Amino acid sequence: MAVATTAAAGAAVLGYYYTKKNSNARRPPVVSYTIPWIGSAVTMGKDPDTFFQNAREKYGDIFTVQAAGMRSTYVTSAAAISAIYRNSKSFVFTPTRLEFGIKMFDMPRSIVYDNEYMKETMFPMHHRIMASSNVTPMIDALTKHSVDRLEELNAKIAGKQWNTTLEEFAHKPLFRAISAAMFGPLFPAEKSYEPFLIFDDYIPFFAAGAPTLFVQKGIRARNQLIDMFEEYFNTPGWEDEAAELVTMIVDGARNESQPPWTDRELATAFNSDFWAANGNMTWGFFWAVNLMLHEPQSLAPLYEEVDAARDSWLKAHPGADLSGANLTELMDFLNNASLPLITSTVSEALRVSSSSFSIRTVVEDGVTISGYPQFEFSKGDVLVCQTRSVHLDQEIYGSDAATFKPDRFVDAGIVTEGGSRKPFLAFGGGVSQCEGRHFAAKGSKFVMALYLLNFDIQLDPAYETPSSGSALFDMSRIGTGIMHPKKPTHILVSKRK
């Protein structure tokens, strides 16, 4: 979760105008279109999955798209994307990362370009503290705050069942737990929820550089969040239970950076981390539950797995308290329990619900992509790695690649017939791979187990009927990370006995 994650960096379809480069016969083919300027904008926006599939079949793995006056070169195969990730000297991420910090999060140029603390200290700090070997304290904090949120949910079930939405039941509580795990329990997570949702809705427009006139509501919401952070960092005791990542960055920005960052500058930077976690992890968890609910067996296979794991643990550890009252005992269980189907379900939900653009800028003339010598790129060119095409590639994931299959990543499902690991790009790759991936993946698995241990969850038949996963996604957020749902998901919740 850095200033711009892979998802944030790909939040808009970056384009660039061709000038003299048009005459280069070694440039990728342009997808044909009928209407000048508009190009393929309507077709791509209406059904992006079909658009990219058809374009790849006709033009190959790498092609250029004209859309709304701009041209963008898309890279859609695992091989080509991997080659770009490996060549981080020719295809760089930093320019995109810095520019999106300004465009999306309103970071002042004084900390993005005129100060070395962000690039030299803050970015490396994210990688180090969020590494799998170091992120345990933050996952423990997430679990602790999730237990607190589950106690509140339990209190809302006054009768036999609670009629609510999955957004209220799963997305919002996880948002609050993540916020507390990052910034401490004093952070006003409840107050920040609504402005965050508005700001998140406008992320694609900010990234695309939309005129201020059209994003006023998003700007107001973003300013509300920045105001909250600025005020919070001046609240006595805020740092007592905040994550190490946050306290170290604040301390360094105030005491090591030359010149020191202002509280306003700090607030804009942390709003980016705030979005990176809550704009993706919450919706990833939401889809893991949502898509399972729409399966023929619903959550039954997951209940069976978590119940077996609990019973086995209690047999080996008589008297163990898994209620959350004893966090150490609960964490021992979660860290050691065999939960392969839950783990697979979380990964599969991320695979089918993610739509991220991983963007690279070419920094020298005459660059080619390994394995694709027919195309040559020039300094300043921008390439968009369309990672969703990899996840929907039938040669990799089979004829049912577009289908949610909860056990896809169990056992042999994670490797190809040749024995190599299947490409999984929900967190991006290369130097832009999301630093928060270990926190998100393991944290989602633990929170899923907690929900299953405590609640019986089912679709409300008055509103919901099983349907394919693709029908549930808001495809208009192409390139923005984890997609949002088209509509609220109504559920019935009761306490597990």
Image: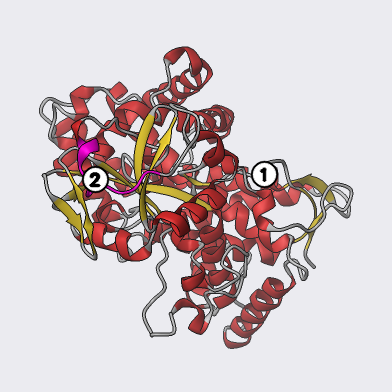
Inter-mark Cα distance, 1 to 2: 33 Å
Q: Which residue is nearer to you in this view: 33 or 113?
A: 33
Q: Which mark is residue 167?
A: 1
Please provide percent x and percent y for residue 443: 49, 59
Task: Kindly identify the residue that appears in the image at 68 percent across and 49 percent down.
Answer: 472
Classify mark 2: helix, strand or loop.
loop
**Mark 1 neighbour density, 10 Å: few (under 14) some (14–19) many (20 or more):** many
Based on the displayed image, in which of its 4 quarters is residue 450 positioned? bottom right
Q: How many marks?
A: 2
| Looking at the image, residue 216 lies above or below residue 190 | above
The overriding secondary structure of the stretch rendered in magenta is loop
- Evaluate whether residue 122 shows in this view: no
Left/right of residue 28 with respect to residue 368 in the rendered view: right
- Evaluate whether residue 45 shows in this view: yes
Please provide percent x and percent y for residue 85: 25, 58
Magenta stretch holds residue 23:
yes
Q: Which residues are magenta?
A: 21-30
Question: The C terminus lies in which quarter of the figure?
Answer: bottom right
| Looking at the image, residue 214 lies above or below residue 86 | above
Circles 1 and 2, Cβ within 8 Å, touching? The answer is no
Q: Which mark is residue 325?
A: none
**Mark 2 neighbour density, 10 Å: few (under 14) some (14–19) many (20 or more):** many
Q: Which residue is nearer to you in this view: 425 or 66?
A: 66
Q: Which residue is nearer to you in this view: 305 or 93?
A: 93
Residue that mark 2 sits on: 93
Looking at the rendered structure, the kind of residue marked 1 is Glu
Classify mark 1: helix, strand or loop.
helix
Please provide percent x and percent y for residue 210: 43, 22
Based on the displayed image, in which of its 4 quarters is residue 82 positioned? bottom left
Looking at the rendered structure, the kind of residue marked 2 is Phe
| Looking at the image, residue 228 lies above or below residue 167 | above
Q: Outermost residue toward the bottom?
A: 316
